[in-house]
Amino acid sequence: VEAGLKYFVLGAFAAALYLMGAAFVYAGTGTLQLSGIAAHSDLPLLVYHIPVRAGVEVTLASLEAIASRVPHFIGMKHASADLTLVSDAIAAFGPGFRVLVGLEELSFPMLALGAAGMVNAVANVAPARVASLYEAMAAGEPIATKHLLAELGRTKPLSVVMAEKIEALREWAAERTV
């Protein structure tokens, strides 16, 4: 019962925060459209492109539409296997357009296409290896990069390493909910 009550309260809190967050944005800007929100700030704008979670694919046309309305639009975190979008965006917007790699397995090809950096989840587990991969690519050291990619390939996310413990925790929690 206690776990169920905690789950309900945390869910209600998260929903309220999400809804109120949108209300705060609307109250401050008068809109929920990206270009309208961006017009209220001079901070650089990056689009977060993660279609597997958002359910929406960013296209070059949508990036061009944002760029035409938001002068401080500077790039995107790209967590998609669409390498064509990376090369097309860099060609369309020039070298000042920053593409940040969001998928570990595509770090090397995106950096080779001209990505400006990496925002990979594995950096939480192996930050030195991820930094070394970027530094090797920036210095044009493909041999070192090959070895670093092999090292990163051997790095396992905590969800894999701790899978049994996570499943046991889920089962334990399931037994205590209503």
Image: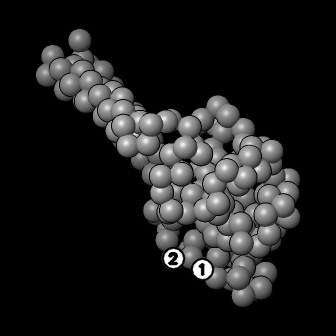
Q: Position of residue 152 (x, y in %)?
A: 61, 66
* Quarter of the image where the C terminus is located: top left
Label 1 secondary element: helix
Q: Position of residue 51 (x, y in %)?
A: 66, 39
Is residue 19 visible from the viewing direction of this image?
yes
The residue that disc 2 covers is: 128
Within-10-Å neighbours for mark 1: few <14, some 14–19, many 20+: some
Name which residue type carries label 2: Ala
User: Which label was assigned to residue 86?
Assistant: none
Asked if residue 170 is positioned above or below residue 120 in the image, the reply reads above
Q: So how many labels did they put on this image?
A: 2
Within-10-Å neighbours for mark 2: few <14, some 14–19, many 20+: few
Q: Nearer the viewer, residue 115 or 76?
A: 76
Q: Residue furthest left?
A: 2
Name which residue type carries label 1: Ser
Asked if residue 129 is positioned above or below residue 53 in the image, the reply reads below
Report which quarter residue 175 is drawn in: top left
Marks 2,1: beta carbons within 8 A: yes
Q: For the residues marked 2 and 1, what is the alpha-carbon distance in whole angstroms?
A: 6 Å
Report which quarter residue 146 is drawn in: bottom right
Is residue 155 visible from the viewing direction of this image?
no
Left or right of 65 on screen, residue 101: left
The residue that disc 1 covers is: 132
The residue at 46%/62% (across/down) is 124
The residue at 59%/57% (across/down) is 46
